[in-house]
Each structure stands twice: as structure tokens, then as C-alpha cells.
Image (cartoon, rainbow, N blue to C red):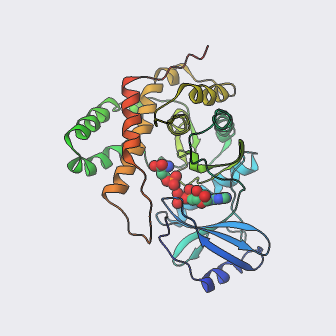
Amino acid sequence: MSVYTEVERDDLVAFLSDYSVGELVSYQGISDGIENTNYFVTTSKGEYVLTLFEQHTFGELAYFLDVMTFFYMNDIPSAHPEADSQGHYLKKLCGKPAALVVRLPGRGVNATATIEQCAQIGAVMADMHLVGQSFQSRRPSERGPEWRQQTAQQLLPQLDDERTGILKNELAHQQGYATLGLPEGVTHSDLFRDNALFEGNKLSGIIDFYFASDEYLLYDLAVAVNDWCVGEDGLPEATRYQSLMKHYLQKRALTESEQANWNMVCRAAALRFWLSRLQDQLFPREGELTQIKNPDAFLSILKYHREHPLTLDFN
Ligand SMILES: Nc1ncnc2c1ncn2[C@@H]1O[C@H](COP(=O)(O)OP(=O)(O)O)[C@@H](O)[C@H]1O
Ligand SMILES: N[C@@H](CCOP(=O)(O)O)C(=O)O
């Protein structure tokens, strides 16, 4: 469970009094999530998610809340923040920036995804990439090539010989990533199975836009493929992959340059999560109770892409 900051009832009551959400009925820490402290909050008027942001400043958060509002307003099924009585999405609670987001129905996908779920994620990601072209705010990626390079330097002294060899080789292979010049736009950049809520096979909405940034659109697609399209063995699996990709490509075709660099971008996306999971494991943050995701799952996916480039031929 990730609850880094405990919120007292009186503080929450005072916080909610600035919104038109009725009286506090109950609240409970949320067991999923890694980055932030989250609570489910029930009031006399509805259900919400309270997030206390553990890492980001007020300035950065304005961007994320704008992204959420933008996608929601453009018919992308997604979580959206409530405004307080002054029209602000962000407030302070327990000394941290905090926001109240409407709770979506459904649950994250905690098993392998169904073919239909992959289809819906492919289609909604293409919609996001298309409407996102008119989003005006800009934010560079915080987990881009420079971060990957710096994090690798922090981690290398702790890794065994096999992992050291793969990491160094992979960094060298991806040296040209920053200058590929692929189409960019606002991306979710963390659209994993636990960041899309489904009621059965129906997508109720996308959550957790807190890694959103300007990135290659292809990177966003690779992040999703690396998580949604794995089979029971945790490696990319053909039917899920075809389902997600076909539904994406029906709405947005890849450029020649995107097609040529698909393997490198899949590898960059796998490397990013291998590194962040290793960092969480080897340099854990203090928290009441935190969950750490298995870094080796992404090492295996990275190795898979190194040995078996995914095809883009779906005929
Ligand atoms: N708008 C929402 N509606 C319903 N559940 C949500 C919503 N936002 C977050 N959650 C729940 O909170 C959990 C953690 O949220 P998430 O944003 O992924 O946290 P973190 O940023 O800490 O990783 C999710 O897995 C989901 O169960
Ligand atoms: N999706 C990432 C972790 C990022 O944390 P999140 O809970 O905010 O999605 C991973 O699986 O490593």
C-alpha cells in the first residue's frame, strides 16, 4: 500500500469545506499506486479520490490537472478534478499539494488483459494522440533519455554482471533516441493496466496522468504495448498485440520513421520502467506501507525486444 502521508479527519473536513461536495461520510487509504498518497473519499454528494502529491510542485501539477481536464472535455473517458469555490483544482493539505478527483466506476486490470480490453486501449490511445495535437501547454518528459542515462549511473554500482552488461549495451544502442525526430505530442506515458478502469470489458476511464508530458507518440504506444499485450509468461503475446495495434492504426497510421524505429522505442519504454522499478527497489522512499513492482518483469520484456523485434505487418 502506498500511503506516504496520513490525513487526519478534521483536516480533511476543513479541506472539503472549500468544495461543493457535501459532508464527509468516510475515507480510506488506497492500496494501489506508487507515486502519491491516495484516499477514497465518500461524501453526502458522491465518491472522490483525494490525491496528495508527494513529488511534484504546485507549478508542475497545474499542467497535469490541465491535461486531465483537457482530455475529459474532449470526450476521452478519463478522471477529472473538481474545482474548489475559487475555481482552483489544487489546494494544500498536510503541507502537500492536493486535488480531489471524481471517482470513476470499475477497477484496474490486475490480470492479463482481454483482447477486447487491448482493442479499447489501442483505440482510446489513438484518440488521445489525435485530440492532444491541439493541447497548448508543454512539459518535457521527466523520464526521457537524460533521466535514463543518469538513473543508470546511480544504479550500475548495485547491479550484477549480467544486468550491468545489458544496461550498458542498451544505453549505447539507444544513444540516438533523443534525435529520432518522431511525431510528438502530449502523452500519458504510464498507461498501464492499473491506470485504466474497466467494468468488465468496458473502459470507464483512464487515470493517473502524473507522468504526462511531451514525448514521441510512439513511446506512449510502446509503454502500453509492453504492459497490456503480455501473456501469462509476462512477455509480448501476438493476439493482444495485434488487437491493440490494429485498433490504434485504424485511427492513426505510423509514419515511415516511426515504423523504422519501433524496436528502439519499445526498448526505450521497457528500459524506462526497468530503471524506475530498480530505483524504487534499491533506493526506496520512506512511507507507511509501500508496494514495489518487480523490476525483472521489465528486464525480461527488454530482453524480448532485443531478441524478437515486434512486427508491424498485420496482414
Ligand atoms: N479517478 C479515480 N477513480 C477511481 N479510482 C481511482 C481514481 N484515481 C485513482 N484511483 C485508484 O487509486 C489507485 C492509485 O491511483 P494512481 O493515480 O495510480 O496512484 P499513484 O499516482 O500513486 O500511482 C488506482 O489504482 C485506483 O484504484
Ligand atoms: N506503472 C509503473 C509505475 C508508476 O506508478 P503508477 O502506480 O503511478 O502507475 C510501473 O508499473 O512500474
Residue that lies at the very extreme toward the front in this rendered image: 232
Q: Quadrant of ligand 1?
A: bottom right
- Please report the residue visible at 47 percent of the width from the left and 70 percent of the height from the top: 4
- Please report the residue visible at 50 percent of the width from the left and 19 percent of the height from the top: 311
Residue 255 or 77: which is nearer the viewer?
77
Residue 24: quadrant of the picture: bottom right
Q: Where's residue 249, x and y in %? A: 64, 25
Q: Where's residue 188, x and y in %? A: 57, 46
Residue 140 or 2: which is nearer the viewer?
2
- Please report the residue visible at 43 percent of the width from the left and 47 percent of the height from the top: 143
Q: Is residue 288 left or right of residue 120?
A: left
Residue 60 seen in the current view: no
Residue that lies at the very extreme toward the bottom in this rendered image: 10
Q: Is residue 227 left or right of residue 45?
A: left
- Please report the residue visible at 56 percent of the width from the left and 61 percent of the height from the top: 61
Q: Where's residue 212, x and y in %? A: 55, 49
Relative height, residue 21 to residue 308 (above, below)? below
Residue 247: quadrant of the picture: top right
Relative height, residue 269 to residue 104 (above, below)? above
